[in-house]
Image: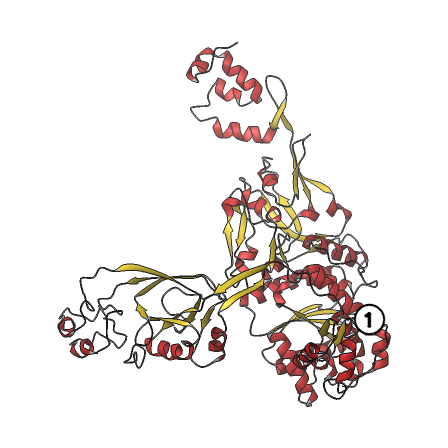
Amino acid sequence: MPLQTQKLGQALGESLTLHSTLCRREAGAFQKAIQSGQEVVVACTQEKKLFTELATQTEGATSPIKFVNIREMGGWSSDAQNASPKLAALLAAAHLPEPDPVPVVPFKSEGRLLIIGPLDKAEKAAALLADALQVVIFAQGAGDAGGAQARQYPVIAGQLTKLTGWLGAFDVSWTENNPINLDLCTRCNACVEACPENAIGLDYQIDMNACNSSRACVKVCQAAGAIDFNREPHEAAEKFDLILDLRAAGAVGPGFPQHAPPQGYFKWDGQDLSTLIKLRDMVGEFEKPKFFAYKQKLCAHSRNETVGCNACIDICSAEAISSEKSRQQIKVNPNLCVGCGACTTVCPTGALTYGYPKAQEQGLKIKTLLSTYHAAGGQDATLLLHSQDAGAACIEELGRSAQLKLAKGVPANVIPMSLWHTASLGLEVWLTAIAYGAKQVLVLNTHEEAPQYVDGLNAQMAVAQSLLAGLGYTGVHFQIIQAKSAMDLDVSLQANLQAQKQLSSQSKLQVPAVFAKYAVAPEKRGTLELALDHLSEHAPAALNDTNKIIALPKPAPMGSLKVNADKCTLCLSCVSACPASALQDNPELPQLRFIEKNCVQCGLCATTCPEDAIDLVPRFLRTPDRKQAQVLNQSQPYGCVKCGKAFGTLKAIEAMLGKLAGHSMFQGAALERLKMCSDCRVIDIYSNTEEAKILNLPPKA
């Protein structure tokens, strides 16, 4: 790599010595460094295993060690000579502290494995696993060859009715509805040979649709009770730690069709042995991070059993989130959660937050990368967000191809940043990256992302792009790159680079004239407000009457409301439904007030309104009015006809009188009482002796 040690040292504020054979002849320098007690960053991931082993063998080694890949990320590329600012940024980020520990979700597996599928394939898979796991086969047909003559594994069969759970806790239920009992069957094949209808297969189960009740099988069976046509079907259930599913895609019966199945469940096509290797290792106690935190008070899912926001439920590829509208909340199953973070990205309120790592830790990393890059003289910074698995592998492959002159590699202005999953960051962090000085945010999607993730990210990008365009920032600042291979990624990155070079001065990507200094807040809405305030303050387009309102696409997490004053009765049911305190009443006057800054566009007010008088208006208001309470509707108070005290609105009381005037229960004095306050209404009823008797009221004092 053409490393410029002096420039890197200046950018990092320290003196650097370049080691070219640190893993071999210069290993002593590494050992000396890790004996210092100070943090050591090794800019080589190729020999991470070797360095880690060397550290354990070095006497007096007390230094914490971190590794960072600067080679495939930029050192191996066609413009590596210009990559020093990026390499400095990557090295600076490597010095950041490790994310705070988070709660963990425990799993325990004793190795009880259920293999579901055709008997011949299931027995072949069992042969490769039985020495490490406790195997039970659930036969789903005989397959092409049928079961082996020698029965080596427990086999069950029937109609699968339930398959739920996760690693260490799978619940399996089925109906035993076949005349042949597999526990008693000796596989002598006498019944198979004797059946005149060929209704018995080599899974030793009878096809009842083909059987004509000749009972020839019963006559030849020598195992007492093995074949009993009078046996009543009954339900059976068992628990397993692991599931290996050999059924073809779309097979009838319960399963896990979602994009992200639970841990401990594996589909296998009979080819890739890595699946079986993973299964063999899944015995013991395991744990994973609890990726999310949930604040029910902020949740906009439901109020009063009325559903508003379903964004997290709709996007979850693991089906780990369900509705509990009776409790005004959602429920997240931490055992099923795979940590993609998509739910936290689309959550408009921040009720769901990502915890591994936290948003503020991700924000600090982005700020460090961009500030170091700019301080080192870097220009036109582009942030490339990628997953730590398939995304990182794609970039590494691209780097190797570039070193072999088969590809261009990662451009010098593109700074890769690894995430647990690319769906875990959304528009508030993307906008913050722009506020920090990034000209573009690219999100690399490979084969591992669920389709709904891509839809969700595109929707978020449409909102973020609309905001920047409305503020006068020209150019396309956000883009998803779909790449299933390194060559796909290379083509996309080079095409994007050339497109930016060809833009005219009027359409080039713009960033704020002053880069932001704020830190990403723990609360999503807080970060969003900081980003909007900074981007608005330094917007290229000065505030005027034509751009003070920026229209946004749905589903935007901000906006206004349009209230039909002719329909609205000021019942204020929308106020009680609003989870964000965007809608408020006025204790002094019949008013519906609204603070636009608080609105998350969840729609609970619209679905709650009995008069269907509310419509959502996704937008961003640039004026200070956005943070002030505005009156959406108001009405003249209605005074009690007895005492004159206001107890409702004129419109609401008139609407009620109009609806009840024809009712038999509200005639004469009863209708007149509807015009009274609650106190006067009671007094009037007591004063009418006949009505008091009917209502069984005590005598008037």
In the rendering, at what x and y percent does residue 409 appear? 70, 83
Which image quarter: residue 404? bottom right
Instruction: State whether residue 503 appears in this view.
Output: no
In the rendering, at what x and y percent does residue 590 appear? 65, 32
Q: Is residue 162 above or below residue 28?
A: above
- Answer few, some or many: residues within 10 Å of disc 1's Cα (few below 14, many 20 plus, some between 14 and 19): many
In the rendering, at what x and y percent does residue 278 appear? 50, 75
Residue behind mark 1: 374
Q: Is residue 221 above or below residue 464?
A: below
Q: Is residue 537 above or below residue 67?
A: above
Q: Nearer the viewer, residue 18 or 500?
A: 18
- Left or right, 693 with respect to 11, comes to left
In the rendering, at what x and y percent does residue 47 appear? 68, 82
Quadrant of the snapshot with the N terminus:
bottom right
Which image quarter: residue 466? bottom right
Element at label 1: helix
Q: Nearer the viewer, residue 200 or 152?
A: 152
Disc 1 residue type (three-letter): His
- Left or right, 16 with respect to 186, comes to right
Residue at the location (81% across, 74% down)?
378
Instruction: State whether residue 69 appears in this view.
Output: yes
Residue at the location (59% across, 19% down)?
641
Residue furthest front in the image? 59
Q: Nearer the viewer, residue 474 or 488?
A: 488
Q: Is residue 249 above or below residue 563?
A: below
Q: Nearer the viewer, residue 664 or 518?
A: 518
Residue at the location (74% across, 61% down)?
432
